[in-house]
Amino acid sequence: MKLAINLAQASTLIESTGAYNTILLRGAPGVGKSSILKTLSQRMPDYMPCYIDVANLDLGDLAMPVIDRDSMTTSYAPNARFGIAKGQNKPVLLMLDELGKASRPVLNMLLPVILEHRLGDVNLPPGSIVFGTTNLDTDGVGDNIPAHAYNRMTVVNVSNPTTDEWLH
């Protein structure tokens, strides 16, 4: 049997280690993984909460090319949904929801966000927290994360809530 933590413990884990360690929460559909962003944003008002529904992203939803005609190079401007606009220095609380349903190109583009807290050439503000959610492989809902992506995160199983946890 694998160790599993409840949602309150998962929130505490993300809050205490998320600035230097990306946590991936794995659990059955409907147990409340997606609600953790709201819980964390209430506990961490100095952070800008950003919800990314990874299952619905295409490459153009992550960043768009910007051409520097003087140097004849291209860089990428991140989509506003990532909360890292020019001059925005507030740490970001970035939730990558349904990470296991990402298309391979989108997942590859998100790997530096997960490991290095940067999207393209743009770093997340210092202290930013990145975490993800996914369903269990055994749930049969299409979640699949390759080993090279799992290696960039601390993967934690989330238990099904008890009756008391559902009521609170």
Image (cartoon, rainbow, N blue to C red):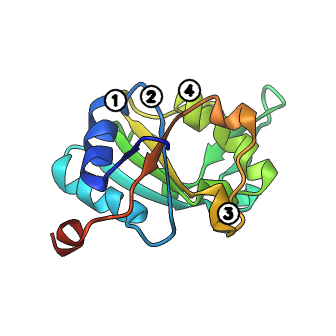
**Residue on which disc 4 sits:** 116
* Callout 3 secondary element: loop
- The Cα atoms of the two marked residues, 3 and 4, are separated by 20 Å
N-term-proximal mark, 1 vs 3: 1
Label 4 element class: helix
Instruction: Write down the quadrant of residue 57 in the picture.
Output: bottom right
The residue beneath circle 2 is 21
Q: Is residue 49 above or below residue 75?
A: below
Kind of residue indicated by mark 2: Asn
Question: Going 55% across and 33% down the picture, which residue do you hit?
Answer: 153
Residue indicated by mark 1: 17
Nearest to viewer (mark 2 / mark 3):
2
Residue drawn at x 17%, y 75% as measured from the top left: 167
Q: Position of residue 168 (x, y in %)?
A: 15, 69
Tag 2 near tag 3, CB within 8 Å = no
Query: What residue would you read off at disc 3?
Result: 57
Q: CA distance from mark 1 to mark 3?
A: 27 Å
How far apart marks 4 and 2 lie (CA) works out to 10 Å
**Left or right, 77 with reference to 87:** right
Q: Looking at the picture, how far across and down is residue 76, in whole percent? A: 69, 41
Decide: is 55 above or below 63. Answer: below
Q: Is residue 101 left or right of residue 167?
A: right
Query: Percent position (x, y) of residue 99?
Result: 61, 54
- Residues at marks 3 and 4 touching, judged by CB atoms closer than 8 Å: no
